[in-house]
Amino acid sequence: MDDPRRGRSTARADPSLDRRILALAVPALGALVAEPLFVLVDSAVVGRLGTAPLAGLALASTVLLTVVGLCVFLAYATTAAVARRLGAGDVRGALTLGVDGLWLAAGLGVVLAAAVGTTAPWLTAALGADGEVARQAVTYLRWSAPGLPGMLLVLASTGALRGLQDTRTPLWVAAGGAVLNAVLSVALVHGAGLSIAGSGLGTTLAQLAMGAVLVVVVVRGARRAGAPLRPAIAGIRANVRAGAPLLVRTLSLRLAILLTVVVATGLGATALAGHQVVNAVWALTAFALDALAIAAQALVGHALGAGDLERTRAVLRRTLQWGTGAGVVLGVVVAVVAGVLPGAFSPEPDVRSAVTGGLLVAAVFLPVAGWVFVLDGVLIGAGDGRYLAAAGMLTLGAYVPAAWAVAAWAPDGAVGLAWLWAAFAGVFMGARAVATGLRARGEGWMVVGA
């Protein structure tokens, strides 16, 4: 295909494309930000119970977020498949795929709920917990695990609605779910005196309610289009085949994040504390960039489904411009606040210094992250999961030696953390930028049709 940098004037001359990108990205950003509020609210409520419950919540939420994060393929694969069918004019087929995704999410959610509830003591022990902290973590996991089917149904139904070019409904449901979770958490933890179990139960009820609302929306659309509501084995298998490579891709990202935490731990308490803050800021900026990636997924899938390669190229060019530009803006913002923000998180001068250094390094590479996230969205929207899986493992392989070098030779504290973020944001994200950029320059990913 053409160099994605070409034809900028054409992309800029199409304000309707910008409107479509923003119409999808802005509500998607709201939904992405609403979800972490669950953990934030639970932390604030449970934190009043004492140190052990809060520490137990930290461990338990890590387990849940990892499980749900690995299942994000339920959203990504469904978005791409539904968008293609919609672009081809097959609304009934698009919603049939959406319904099949719901059945897969429900079945997988039930299995994972049982697995997490059963293995909760082993999972917490594997994370190094014991005593009262372990007991609190197990309690939260066992009360929140029944909500996993709801969490996965939210992913699958959100993916279907994104593929149908609807990011507003998931936004309103996510916002309502966040409010409901906050009310339930306070009422059950403190009002009913259920302690950390009440927090887990509140999360379960809120997630099941969100899943139910979104399922109703998708089912109503399926009925209007005449799509079958029964589970189709062939359709579920197709969802599994499309999702498996994306699971591998997500696994490579999770392993890179885990490796970064391990190295930060080895650099001492100052570096680890600083990394927690820098990583939180990086994650916040990622939401904005991910919102653009979601818009790219839906628009590219729709264009390829319609067989419109010129529109596919226009979406690629313009979303890359948006993503890189957003990365530049976010990088400037992070650099500006790097000297002020650390004081809000720690009174220790060493920790503040580590946070400032890490944030400045991260700020430099945010434009690269914007490029990477959008290209990820483009290739996911094109259904190019196998390439992304292979590229994910290769880029992880490129990052491992860099992380090992930091662990072996970097000094402890602030300097070591700066080198670690140079390795993660520079080497790992840079390798991803090269891998996805080379793919986007070719034509192998542009497969047209439903």
Image: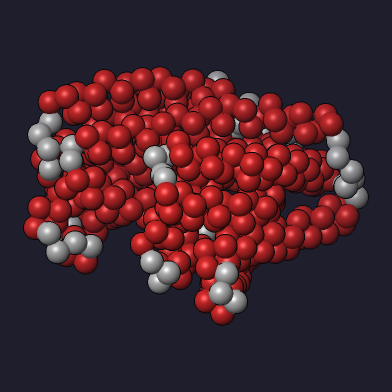
Residue 83 visible (yes or no)? no
Tell me the residue at 21%/66% (across/down): 344
The residue positioned farthest toward the front in the image shown: 131
Q: Decide if residue 229 is on the left or right side of residue 275.
A: right
Image x and y of residue 206, in percent: 64, 64
- Identify the coloring: secondary structure
2 or 267: nearer the eye?
267
Tell me the residue at 25%/27% (across/down): 403
254 or 186: nearer the eye?
186
Which part of the image, by quadrant, shows the C terminus?
top right
| Res 44 quadrant in image | bottom left
User: How many numbered badges does the structure rendering display?
Assistant: 0
Tell me the residue at 33%/32% (across/down): 259
Tell me the residue at 69%/59% (across/down): 208
Relative to 290, is 202 above or below? Answer: below
Relative to 124, is 135 above or below? Answer: below
64 or 444: nearer the eye?
64
The residue positioned farthest toward the bottom in the image shown: 191
Relative to 437, is 343 above or below? Answer: below
Q: Decide if residue 255 is on the left or right side of residue 63.
A: left
Relative to 104, is 387 above or below? Answer: above
Image x and y of residue 53, in percent: 43, 60
Image x and y of residue 288, in percent: 42, 54
Image x and y of residue 384, in percent: 57, 27
| Res 436 quadrant in image | top left
Residue 247 visible (yes or no)? yes
314 or 133: nearer the eye?
133
